[in-house]
Image (cartoon, coloured by chain):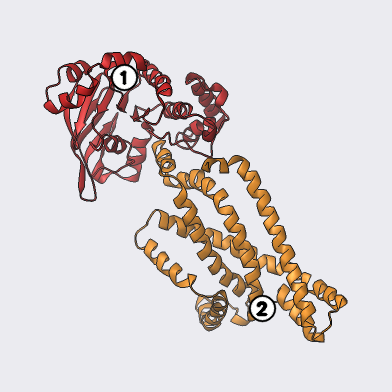
Chain colours: A red, B orange
């Protein structure tokens, strides 16, 4: 289980997160929706300590860490229990698809290179890129890069996978196959937090939908509650553009 | 003024004996400069408090000083302070026992450190933020990130500039003759002093430096190309 409490974060004088609380059970899929600048991505980056939150605490499994007093070891411990899939893929440019997956296994998890390679090939098979193992990121398409990114996250066997708008940089055709892969991981019991603008997909895949704006959680509930019976006016307004979400959802997957 | 090919060849022969001295000074300085330059670049990249601004200040000062002055300054300072220092440390050597090559290496290392710290700082800064994020997100320590991700990405980009610096160091090492080091340049001058045929000696020196630098340029290109095939792809 992952529990975040009272997360605050400011950049210079601008307060981006104003006290976020979120609990994610094992196997739960949480989708975070909201307009640009609402702090969704910052919140996700705080979970992985890519940004250091100013205040609040995070609990993953047995480790409880306070953001304001986190030591280097605490940060490493949290990072090694989480994995992130980035909007712009963030693959290591000088490493092949296979090596991109192996590097974390060998260096962070101290796995033997041979075993890491086996696991990497297995995961590439799973994401449908077995024949691209020795290709460099520059030789892969956007969708392929993102699938390598997902395989890299999966390889670490994290408590939670954080997806930061995983399909925003992809063309519509590639969005489908990437979403299908994410859905497969969710169906297999993966715990995940997704920041996405794919409303239809969120409706279909999420156990919990969180609507954020202005650095706070405006509304939170099951997809049916948030999409079909939103309590807050702002949520209604934001979602009104996606009223035919079910149709969109069918197209996406 | 006549040009004697024979004298030139003689000077060439005498001076080439000292090629190892010149190469030693240049390569050792490059190596030392590489270590300190990288450290300084990393301190500035990670913006470590106080140290970062101290280095920035020192580099700004030293960057503007001609290498001749650095060599002479190193010589003067060490001639002043070496003996008292050696005495206080209980060493039994005095400044007279110090090989002047050490002074030349020290001075050129300062030059190499300054240049390399700027080269590495530039190349490290050109690495995209996503690469850092990715390294952090998979749980690498800062040291692992530097060693396994940043340096392999930065090195191929820095290579042409490093080879350029090596050529500059070889040329600058000719100034070491000012502190009585016998290198290629000094040896040719000494041989010319015997017959006052300076033109031949200078031509011989020019040929040797040119040949050395040509070889360095070529091997650097070769290394670059072989790295290109694999690593440069990353910056497409």
* Eye-nearest disc, 2 or 1: 1
Circle 2 sits on which residue? Answer: B177
The quadrant of the picture occupied by the N terminus of chain A is top left
Q: In which quarter of the image is residue A135?
A: top right
- Report the side of B92 relative to B134 (left or right): right
- Report the side of B226 relative to A116 (left or right): right
Is B209 drawn above or below residue B201 in the view shown? above
Residue drawn at 57 percent across, 80 percent down: B72
Where residue B155 appears, as percent x and y from the top left, is 55, 50
Give the letter of the chain under mark 2: B
Residue B23 visible in the displayed image: yes
Where residue B129 appears, as percent x and y from the top left, is 41, 44
Where residue B55 appears, as percent x and y from the top left, is 42, 65
Residue drawn at 72 percent across, 58 percent down: B215
Residue A231 vs residue A84, the one in the foreground: A231
Residue A50 vs residue A170, the one in the foreground: A170
Circle 1 sits on which residue? Answer: A201
Where residue A13 appears, as percent x and y from the top left, is 20, 50
């Amino acid at each position: 289980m992952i529990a975040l409490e009272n997360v605050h974060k400011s950049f210079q004088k601008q307060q981006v997160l104003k006290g976020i609380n979120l609990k994610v059970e094992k196997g739960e899929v949480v989708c975070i929706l909201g307009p640009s600048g609402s702090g969704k991505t910052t919140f996700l980056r705080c979970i992985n300590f890519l940004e250091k939150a100013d205040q609040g605490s995070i609990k993953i499994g047995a480790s409880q860490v306070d953001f304001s007093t986190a030591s280097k070891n605490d940060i490493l411990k949290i990072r090694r229990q989480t994995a992130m899939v980035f909007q712009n893929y963030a693959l290591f440019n000088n490493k092949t698809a296979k090596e991109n997956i192996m590097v974390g296994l060998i260096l962070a998890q101290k796995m033997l290179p041979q075993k890491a390679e086996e696991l990497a090939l297995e995961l590439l098979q799973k994401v449908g890129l077995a024949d691209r193992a020795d290709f460099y990121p520059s030789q892969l398409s956007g969708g392929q890069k993102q699938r390598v990114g997902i395989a890299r996250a999966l390889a670490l066997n994290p408590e939670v996978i954080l997806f930061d708008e995983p399909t925003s940089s992809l063309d519509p055709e590639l969005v489908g196959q990437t979403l299908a892969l994410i859905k497969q991981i969710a169906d297999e019991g993966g715990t995940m937090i997704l920041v996405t603008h794919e409303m239809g997909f969120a409706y279909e895949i999420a156990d919990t939908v969180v609507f954020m704006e202005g650095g706070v959680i405006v509304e939170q509930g099951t997809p049916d509650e948030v999409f079909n019976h939103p309590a807050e006016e702002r949520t209604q307004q934001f979602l009104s553009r996606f009223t035919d979400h079910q149709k969109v959802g069918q197209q996406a997957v | 003024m006549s040009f004697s090919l024979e004298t030139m060849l003689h000077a060439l022969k005498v001076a080439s004996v000292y090629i190892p001295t010149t190469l030693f000074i240049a390569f050792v300085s490059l190596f030392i400069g590489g270590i300190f330059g990288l450290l300084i670049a990393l301190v500035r990249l990670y913006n470590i408090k106080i140290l970062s601004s101290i280095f920035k200040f020192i580099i700004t000062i030293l960057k503007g000083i001609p290498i001749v002055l650095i060599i002479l300054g190193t010589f003067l300072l060490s001639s002043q302070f070496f003996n008292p220092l050696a005495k206080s440390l209980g060493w039994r050597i005095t400044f007279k026992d110090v090989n002047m090559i050490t002074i030349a290496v020290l001075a050129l290392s300062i030059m190499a450190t300054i240049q390399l710290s700027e080269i590495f700082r530039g190349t490290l800064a050109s690495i995209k933020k996503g690469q850092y994020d990715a390294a952090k997100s998979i749980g690498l320590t800062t040291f692992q990130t530097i060693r396994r991700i940043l340096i392999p990405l930065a090195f191929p980009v820095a290579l042409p500039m490093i080879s350029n610096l090596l050529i500059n160091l070889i040329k600058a090492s000719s100034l070491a003759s000012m502190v009585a080091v016998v290198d290629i340049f000094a040896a040719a001058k000494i041989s010319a002093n015997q017959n006052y045929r300076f033109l031949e000696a200078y031509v011989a020196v020019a040929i040797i430096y040119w040949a050395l630098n040509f070889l360095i340029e070529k091997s650097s290109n070769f290394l670059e190309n072989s790295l290109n095939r694999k690593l440069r792809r990353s910056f497409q």
